[in-house]
Amino acid sequence: MTDRLSGRIAIITGASSGIGAAVARAFAAEGARLVLAARRRERLQELADELGPADVRICPTDVTDEGQVKTLFAQAGEMGPVDLLVNNAGATTHGSAIDMPLDTWRQTLDLNLTAAFICAREAMRAMVPRGRGRIINIGSISAQAPRDNAIAYTASKYGLEGLTRGLALEGRPHGITVSIIHPGSTATELAGKPEDLSKVGPKTMAGATVAQAIVTMASMPDEANLLSATLLPIEQPYLGRG
């Protein structure tokens, strides 16, 4: 523990599993005060119990619901001014353009992009009066090198890159930094089970590895912004594609 985030209040969405849970563990180890948001109350409570003496509040939230997001930020505000937002909530969707139902397209963009906008907007509203704050969006290398049969997911992550840059520009006069990290293949929780560490290796990263990079982004000095980062397992089929 190095206390790089000591005393800072951080909201983490999609915190009940995967990268979100890993970020919560990493932030707690660095002294942050946490507001954990996700749909599954029981999983949030399990994580809060695991973190033990850390200063943690859980707030079950559907981040696609504007009213619930407002409630999330109101509850976080009861702890004090929000310093950090990690926009992690999201889901993968498989399917080609010609086979994609419109409802699936809309649901994917609602969760992966529109929800990030709603949360970032509320964060900006809380941060502007203070003249400081940091928002970190969790993107994907699909925003740089798309995979086949993932049209909605790809579009949502490209959109998140644009959202990041637009918000960074708007936040700049107010001392607010907005950045994005694009992880490659990462082992995340499946079927409610703990992260399958047997998958971790040169082709797949642990969620904790991604969380380490996010801690670095979150702990930058206020006058600096690590705008964008791409994090890959060394054998990710990304570089050298023909």
Image: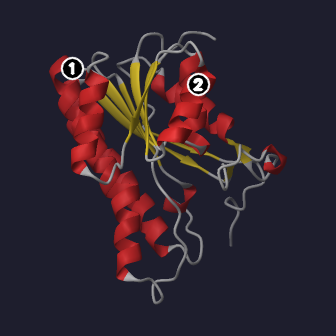
Question: Residue 30, image x and y in percent?
Answer: 56, 16
Q: Amino acid at mark 1?
A: Gly
Check whether the beta carbons of the residues at disc 1 and disc 2 lie within 8 A of each other.
no
- Examine the rendered structure and indicate whether residue 100 appears above or below residue 77: below
Q: Residue at point 44% right, 59% down? A: 157
Q: Residue furthest bottom?
A: 98
Question: Residue 170, image x and y in percent?
Answer: 21, 39
Helix, strand or loop under label 1: loop
The residue identified by callout 1 is 131
Q: Amino acid at mark 2?
A: Asp
Question: Residue 131, image x and y in percent?
Answer: 21, 20
Which of the two residues, 217 or 9, is positioned nearer the viewer here? 9
| 109 sits left or right of 193 in the view | left
| Crowd around label 1: few <14 · some 14–19 · many ≥20 (10 Å) | some
Quadrant location of residue 191? bottom right
The residue identified by callout 2 is 49
Question: Residue 200, image x and y in percent?
Answer: 79, 46
| 167 sits left or right of 236 in the view | left
Which of the two residues, 143 or 110, is positioned nearer the viewer here? 110
- Examine the rendered structure and indicate whether residue 47 appears above or below residue 184: above
Which of the two residues, 158 or 94, is positioned nearer the viewer here? 94
- Examine the rendered structure and indicate whether residue 168 appears above or below residue 113: above
Q: Closer to the N terminus: mark 1 or mark 2?
A: 2
